[in-house]
Amino acid sequence: MHSCDDCGVVFADTHDLQRHVKTWCPEGKKRKAEDSHEEEPPRKTPPLPWISVDEVPSTNEEIDYLDDVRQYFEPLANEAGRKTEDAWREKLGEYKAEGLTENKARSKAFKFTFDEDKREFMRLYSTFLLTAVQLDDSLVHKKILKEVVESEIENPKKTIRRVLKKYSHWFDDLILNQSDDDTESDVSTDHDE
């Protein structure tokens, strides 16, 4: 259990505590106002919480890695697992055919695909990080993200779909240009033959 040093509210995990302190702790806001005699020069655009690294603890002991990884990275791990599912099922069948029990066969098949799963997970996460860093300067992305973050997020997927639908017209020209580029390369390839 973690508690807020400013107001005493107790939280189940570090992430909730950090979000509380950063966004809505009334005592913390009062303290920050008192401490803000020396303000930093304003940034071009206000930072959004999704890319903030201010909340990262300075020592490894302050992070409950297992809970954090399970809570936030599981969708990426599931996607990586789907990429190797066929190989896993094939090995599972082979091990069962060799006479191993269901549990032993599953365990052995998992060990067989573990390295590939991990490589795929790291590739997906790396792609996400690169995209996140690149989008940090995008005003369009910041507007969309701000609306998502400020919405009542009971169902994040539904909220994201709603906001993306609202702004999808902003991307029409980009998609049309991609289609035109693909068509031009197809035409030049056909012409060269």
Image (spheres, helix red, strand yellow):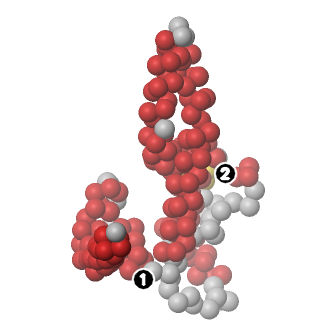
Q: Quadrant of residue 33?
A: bottom right
**Could you tell me which residue is drawn at 64 percent across and 88 percent down?**
40
Residue 165: percent from left, percent from top: 24, 68
| Real-space CA distance between mark 2 and mark 1, rounded to the nearest whole angstrom | 32 Å
Would residue 177 be visible to someone looking at this image? yes
Is 182 rendered above or below residue 38? above
Q: Quadrant of residue 85?
A: top left
Disc number lying in front (2 or 1): 1
Residue 132: percent from left, percent from top: 51, 68
Q: Tag on residue 139?
A: 1
**Label 1 Cα crowd, 10 Å radius (few <14 / some 14-19 / many 20+):** few
Would residue 71 be visible to someone looking at this image? no
**Could you tell me which residue is drawn at 45 percent across and 46 percent down?**
79
Among numbered discs 2 and 1, the one appearing first in the sequence: 2
Amino acid, disc 1? Leu
**Could you tell me which residue is drawn at 45 percent across and 80 percent down?**
138
Which residue in the structure is indicated by mark 2?
63
Q: Tag on residue 183?
A: none
Amino acid, disc 2? Ile
Residue 30: percent from left, percent from top: 56, 76
Q: Nearer the viewer, residue 76 or 151?
A: 76
Q: Nearer the viewer, residue 102 or 54?
A: 102
Tell me: 93 left or right of 125. left
**Could you tell me which residue is drawn at 74 percent across and 49 percent down?**
61
**Label 2 Cα crowd, 10 Å radius (few <14 / some 14-19 / many 20+):** some
Tell me: 118 left or right of 184. right
